[in-house]
Image (spheres, grey):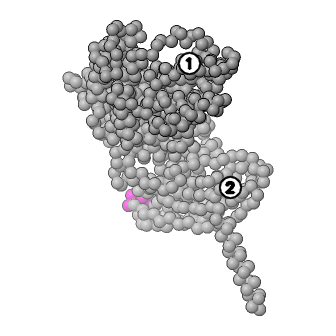
Amino acid sequence: MIKTLISFFLILITGFSLLKAQDAPVHFKFSTKKVSDCEYDLQYHATIDQGWHIYSLVKETEDGPNPTVFNFEKSNDYELVGKTTESKTVKEFDKVFEVDVRYFANTATFTQRVRLKTNKKISIKGTYEFQACTDVKCIFPPADNFEFELQGSASCPGAVTSATVSAPVASLSIATLTDSSTTKDSTVQAIEVESVDPVISEASSAPVEERSFWGIFIAGFIGGLAALLTPCVFPMIPMNVSFFTKQSKTKAQGIRNAFIYSISIIVLYVGLGLGVTLIFGAGALHSLSTNVWFNLAFFFLLLIFAISFLGAFEITLPSGFVNKIDARSDRGGYIGIFFMAFTLALVSFSCTGPIIGTLLVQASATGNITGPFFGMFGFALALALPFGIFAAFPGWLNSLPQSGGWLNAVKVTLGFLELALALKFASNADLVVQAGILTREVFIGLWIVIFSLLTMYLLGLYRTSHDSELKHVSVSRLFVAIISFFMTIYLIPGMWGAPLKLLSGILPPLEYSESPHGFGSSQNTHGTLLKDEEFGKYMEVNKNGIVHFKNDYEHALAYSKKVGKPLLIDFTGHACANCRKTEDYVWPDPGVTKLLNNEVVLVSLYVDDKRPLDPKDHMTVFWYGKERTITDIGDKFKYMEEKVYGQSTQPLYVLVDGSEKVLAPIRGYNPGIPEYIGWLKKGIENYKK
């Protein structure tokens, strides 16, 4: 009898252990998000162990796995708004079920909106079920319970009509934001499954137009050419090429060795760019590019580099480390050639470091690893090209100018340019916090001083401590002086409100001025604000005379519903160069301005605005794998952009209707005016349908 009881308890304990093991692969957390006084989003966040999957809410075939299911207890105190939505699934052929399945790996988020019909505190109860599988086995945990406690409002009773309940709601607002694994909005995913509207499906699944990486490559190539002309690199060209040609038994061997040397340079610099990006993450560097402290740190770093270029001191790496690498270059063979390239990179750091650092930050701000790759590839290609070319044609070495004082002039010129560029990073920090210190007039004034001094230096009106006497001004030096003097003259009207479109995206925006229309102007607005008694106080007129809402999505959406126009969401940033280019080149076009003012409602949401939110607007969300509290304006809209539309780049333009359904393919940066007009008209046409 005792043995029987012991056996029974062992079986019972084993059963509970197995059940616990079965439950372990998937862990659910519940949270709520208040949408309005009477509406809440119930959120179910699932964390899934490595190797396990759970499945979509929609079962596509009878032979497939069991879907995830949420059941709600009926109550007169609330009603469900629309269907439960889910974060993005992976769709692929499953070898176990031998059909295509939609599943979640690592994380999943499910959202159900509810509308309360009472002013009391109520409990919403129900159960959820799911099937979890690996490649070799599946488990079917029993239904588990959930419960949410919500507080109603006096405005809730009788507020809902049968008309509003009957139509399924497909909202893309910030209130339906989903899990961090999402690459598209969960509601969009649900719309695609239900095939509600072909226009929405087309818009939501269309890829955002990528910014061209040719610009980054060209910028890197120009940076490489500038690095070639510095005292750290230029003297190395004839020295290294002569080494390859003299040490090689045949001309072909010399060319091959120089080619390997050039390839090594490219591999080293591209590896550096990708390494920095992979360590910090392209998305992280994109966020850093609008971070106040990062921009200030880079401002001081470039300031130090500029002072070094101007001759105050030399920045060098530890000599012991450089000597060790240099010693390895004597080993011979391909390894020795590689370490020769490594030595070049280290020795030239004081000249190439500022250029590389600036290039990496700008390229990584794309939020894509391809940016640093193209930028560093362009830089390394320009740096490596002379070694291969002169090795193939050694006679051309005689045509190279001799090293001398002109190299220091190049270095000093780069110092002035670094100084001007440093101000851009200080301006980014100032814009993000809206401190009003480095305004447009102050920035332009400082640039006028910098380029004036550069012009005088190039013309020989003064010398630095390392300069030799300038007996005459060379043609090349004169041409650079002309460009610098042109920049000085071009900048001056900017003090009185000139748009300075050639520098769009670099200078602070026109509205970020001590006087938005320049000194001496009595004009305070670009036109008359819309005299809407309810919404007029929330509107502004931007520098192009376009009426818009700024960082006020809720009122913009409400106004678009009132006037019966689509809402154009402009995800932008104070420190976003391409945003300024669109605003300076595309929006001022009469055709674009007319559409923006008459056919749509424009709202500009600044994702890098670090001013604090009102405490009552703080949001606790599940973002990047954990719960976070959003406390500033920029994070609110950055979260909205990433979670609803699956993008993290600016500018981003989204056209939606009153129920927040996407009307046209989501659009990124593209400077083409006809394309922008066509895109607007397509969205407006779909809205009217």
**Local crowd size for mark 1, using a 10 Å CA cut-off: few (<14), some (14–19), many (≥20):** many
Question: Helix, strand or loop at disc 1?
Answer: helix
Rounded to the nearest angstrom, the CA distance separating label 2 from label 1 is 51 Å
Residue at the spot of label 2: 51
Q: Quadrant of residue 544?
A: top left
Residue 534 percent coordinates (x, y): 32, 42
When the figure is inspected, residue 249 is found, relative to residue 601, above or below; the finding is above
Q: Which mark is residue 154?
A: none
Number of marks present in the image shown: 2
**Horizontal side, residue 465 vs residue 351: left or right:** left
Residue type (three-letter) at the residue carrying disc 1: Pro
Q: Please name the residue shown 59% across and 31% down the image.
A: 329
When the figure is inspected, residue 285 is found, relative to residue 232, above or below; the finding is below
Looking at the image, which is closer to me, 291 or 265?
265
Main SS of residues in magenta: loop
- As for residue 80 lying within the magenta part, the answer is no
Q: Please name the residue shown 69% across and 18% down the image.
A: 249
**Horizontal side, residue 554 vs residue 345: left or right:** left
User: Which mark is first along the chain, 1 or 2?
Assistant: 2
Q: Which mark is residue 386?
A: 1
Residue 333 percent coordinates (x, y): 67, 29
Q: Which residues are magenta?
A: 154-160
